[in-house]
């Protein structure tokens, strides 16, 4: 999937006003996700995303994955994007369901396996959630 296609899907799912807004939200969500999964998984995921977005993810990589729950994930997305936590949940879902569409099933399973089951819904995989 090309970057413009990815952002168009995020824009549609998130009901954003512009492609620039979709990109800003996408970069914010990916930045928080990069903190939450292992550095090796960040690299693997980045390799399957369109280049500018993969680079954004890789640039946010940490030495070690941080351990925080879904509510803290929303809080951090809200801080990065200037949204309220409830809006951040919507935003994160728009981005991460698009990530799920853009990557292989094996890679998606690897990412989700590093997160508590409550995150699965954000990727459009409610059947894997508690």
Image: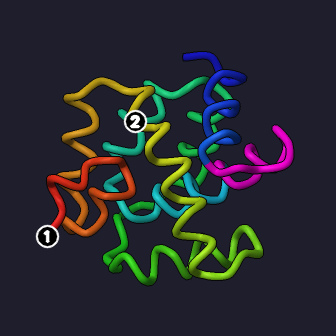
Could you tell which of marks 2 and 1 lies nearer the N-terminus? 2
Which color scheme is applied?
Answer: rainbow
Residue at disc 2, secondary structure: helix
Q: Number of labelled discs?
A: 2
Residue 15 magenta: yes
Above or below — where is 23 with respect to 101?
A: below
Is 46 positioned to the left or the right of 2 in the image? left
How far from the left and from the top, in percent, is residue 115? Answer: 25, 62
Q: Quadrant of the N terminus?
A: top right
Image quarter for residue 116?
bottom left
Q: Position of residue 76 (x, y in %)?
A: 57, 77
Indicate left or right for 124 with 18 as reference: left
Residue 48 against residue 112 in the figure, above or below:
above
Q: Nearer the viewer, residue 45 or 29?
A: 29
Left or right of residue 119, residue 49 in this image: right
- Pair 2/1: label in front: 1
Residue 37 tag number: none
Image position, residue 110 (x, y; %) = 21, 42
Label 2 neighbourhood size at 10 Å, few (<14), some (14-19), many (20+)? many
> What span is colored magenta in the figure?
14-26
Dot 1: element: loop
Question: In this view of the protein, which residue sits in the foreground, 73 or 39?
Answer: 73
Q: Which residue is mark 2?
A: 45
Give the residue displayed 31% in from the left and 63% down from the top: 119
* Residue 118 x %, y %: 25, 69
Q: Which residue is mark 1?
A: 130
Question: Residue 102 sits in which quadrant?
Answer: top left
Residue appearing at x 71%, y 50% in the figure:
15
Q: CA distance from mark 2 to mark 1?
A: 24 Å
Q: Residue at x 55, y 52 (%)?
A: 30
Does the magenta stretch mainly form a helix, a strand or a loop? helix
Picture quarter with the C terminus: bottom left
């Amino acid at each position: 999937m090309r970057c413009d296609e990815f952002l168009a899907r995020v824009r549609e799912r998130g009901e954003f006003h512009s492609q620039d807004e979709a990109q800003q939200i996408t970069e914010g969500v990916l930045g928080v996700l990069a903190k939450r999964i292992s550095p090796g998984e960040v690299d693997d995921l980045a390799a399957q995303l369109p280049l500018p977005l993969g680079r954004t993810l890789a640039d946010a990589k940490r030495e070690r994955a941080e351990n925080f729950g879904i509510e803290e994930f929303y809080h951090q997305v809200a801080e990065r994007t200037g949204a309220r936590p409830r809006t951040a949940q919507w935003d994160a879902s728009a981005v991460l369901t698009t990530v799920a569409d853009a990557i292989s099933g094996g890679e998606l399973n690897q990412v989700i396996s590093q997160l508590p089951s409550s995150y699965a819904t954000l990727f459009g995989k409610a059947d894997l959630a508690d």
